[in-house]
C-alpha cells in the first residue's frame, strides 16, 4: 500500500475506485465504504482511501494510532492511502476543483464511494448530488452508501468516543466491528504489583490516543501470537502516584514471564470498575485480588473469542 500525505505528492497513474471521508476510527460504517470500493477490483480498478483530516484536530482524540490505521487498511486490501490535512489550500478549494484536480487528475477516479452525508469544497458547498452531476461529466460513477446503524443509532466516531468515555468498551467494540485496543512496547514500571503478588506489564499509550474511562477492565492480550486473559488498569494510579501521565497496567492471568521489550496488543473486553483512590496498600491489594477474580471468571466464560 502506497501512502501520500499532501496534494502535491499524490502520484497514482492507474484507474481507481476512491472512497472519501474522515475515516477517524475505521468503524463499521467506514469499513463498509472501503469494502464497496474494493468490489471494483474485479473491474481492474485499484482501491484508494482518501482521508480528509478534520479541522481543529486535537491531542488525545484518535481512536486508532497511525500504525494501527495503516495495518487495518493494508489488511482490507487498500492499494493507496491518501490523507490530506485541512490546510488553507484545501479549505479554499471549490467543490468542482476538488473533483477535477484531486479525484480526476491526481487519482484517475472512475468510481467514487461516499456516505450519504459527505460534504466537500469551500463552504462545504459540495454534496453527493454535486459529486454525481460533475463526476458524470468526467466519466466517474458515484456510489452513495446509506448510514450504518447499530441498535437504531448511527455508527459514528463520536458515538464510539461516548461509549469509551462511559467505560462501555463492549458497546464500542460493536460499533467498531473489533475490540477497542491499546498496543505498545512493554516497559518497566515501579514493580509495585509484583511486590504485592500480582506482576503487571506496563504500556504507556501514545499521546494521540483517545482513552477509555479510567478504571479496571477485563482484557485479552496478544503477545507474539499468543493470547492471554488479563485484568487491566488504565489511569494515573491515584493511590500510589501523583503522576499525570496515564499508564496501562495489565496483570496476565497465570503468567509470570520476562516480557520486557515485546509488543503487546491489549483488547478491552468489558468494564469491571472505575478508578478510585484507596486508603492503604492493604485495601488496594484486597480490591485488586477481587478484580483479578472477576477477570478470571470472565475469561473462563469465553473471553478469548475475538471479533
Image (cartoon, rainbow, N blue to C red):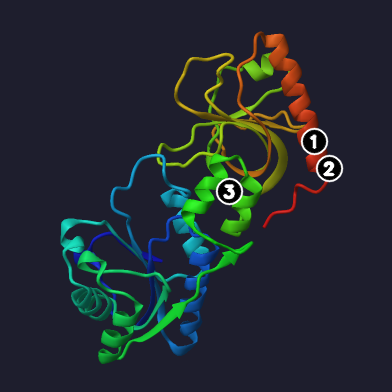
Could you tell me how far apart the alpha carbons at marks 3 and 1 are, in whole angstroms? 20 Å
Q: Residues within 10 Å of mark 3 (few under 14, many from 20)?
A: many
Could you tell me how far apart the alpha carbons at marks 1 and 2 are, in whole angstroms? 6 Å
Query: x and y percent of residue 175 in the render?
Result: 58, 57
For residue 300, the mark is 2
Q: Are marks 3 and 1 in contact (CB under 8 Å)?
A: no
Could you tell me how far apart the alpha carbons at marks 2 and 3 are, in whole angstroms? 21 Å
Residue at which label 3 appears: 180
Up/down of 137 relative to 163, above or below = below
Residue 254 picture quarter: top right
Q: Residues within 10 Å of mark 2 (few under 14, many from 20)?
A: few
Up/down of 292 relative to 108, above or below = above
Q: Residue at x 16, y 64 (%)?
A: 92
* 2 or 3: tag closer to the N-terminus: 3
Label 2: which secondary element: helix
Up/down of 288 relative to 168, above or below = above
Up/down of 107 relative to 29, above or below = below
49 left or right of 11 in image: right
Q: Residues within 10 Å of mark 1 (few under 14, many from 20)?
A: some
Q: Nearer the viewer, residue 72 or 211?
A: 211
| Quarter of the C terminus within the rendering | bottom right
Amino acid at each position: 500500500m502506497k501512502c501520500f500525505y499532501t496534494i502535491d505528492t499524490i502520484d497514482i497513474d492507474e484507474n481507481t475506485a476512491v472512497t472519501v471521508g474522515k475515516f477517524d476510527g475505521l468503524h463499521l460504517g467506514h469499513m463498509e465504504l472501503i469494502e464497496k470500493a474494493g468490489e471494483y477490483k474485479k473491474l481492474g480498478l485499484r482501491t484508494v482511501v482518501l482521508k480528509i483530516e478534520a479541522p481543529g484536530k486535537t491531542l488525545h482524540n484518535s481512536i486508532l494510532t497511525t500504525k494501527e490505521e495503516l495495518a487495518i487498511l493494508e489488511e482490507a486490501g487498500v492499494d493507496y492511502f491518501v490523507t490530506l490535512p485541512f490546510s488553507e489550500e484545501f479549505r479554499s478549494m471549490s467543490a468542482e476543483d476538488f473533483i477535477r484536480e484531486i479525484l480526476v487528475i491526481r487519482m484517475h477516479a472512475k468510481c467514487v464511494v461516499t456516505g450519504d452525508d459527505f460534504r466537500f469544497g469551500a463552504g462545504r458547498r459540495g454534496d453527493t448530488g454535486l459529486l454525481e452531476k460533475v463526476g458524470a461529466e468526467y466519466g466517474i460513477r458515484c456510489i452513495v452508501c446509506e448510514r450504518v446503524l447499530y441498535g437504531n443509532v448511527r455508527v459514528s466516531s463520536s458515538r464510539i468516543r461516548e461509549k469509551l468515555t462511559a467505560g462501555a468498551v463492549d458497546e464500542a467494540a460493536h460499533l467498531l466491528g473489533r475490540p477497542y485496543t491499546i498496543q505498545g512496547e512493554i516497559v518497566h514500571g515501579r514493580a509495585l504489583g509484583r511486590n504485592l503478588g500480582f506482576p503487571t506489564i506496563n504500556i504507556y499509550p501514545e499521546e494521540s490516543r483517545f482513552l477509555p474511562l479510567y478504571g479496571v477492565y477485563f482484557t485479552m492480550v496478544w503477545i507474539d501470537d499468543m493470547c492471554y486473559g488479563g485484568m487491566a488498569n488504565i489511569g494515573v494510579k491515584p493511590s500510589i502516584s501523583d503522576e499525570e501521565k496515564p499508564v496501562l497496567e495489565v496483570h496476565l492471568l497465570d503468567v509470570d514471564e520476562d516480557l520486557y521489550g515485546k509488543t503487546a496488543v491489549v483488547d478491552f473486553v468489558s468494564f469491571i470498575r472505575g478508578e478510585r483512590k484507596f486508603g492503604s496498600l492493604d485495601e488496594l491489594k484486597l480490591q485488586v485480588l477481587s478484580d483479578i477474580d472477576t477477570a478470571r471468571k470472565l475469561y473462563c466464560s469465553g473471553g478469548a473469542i475475538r471479533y
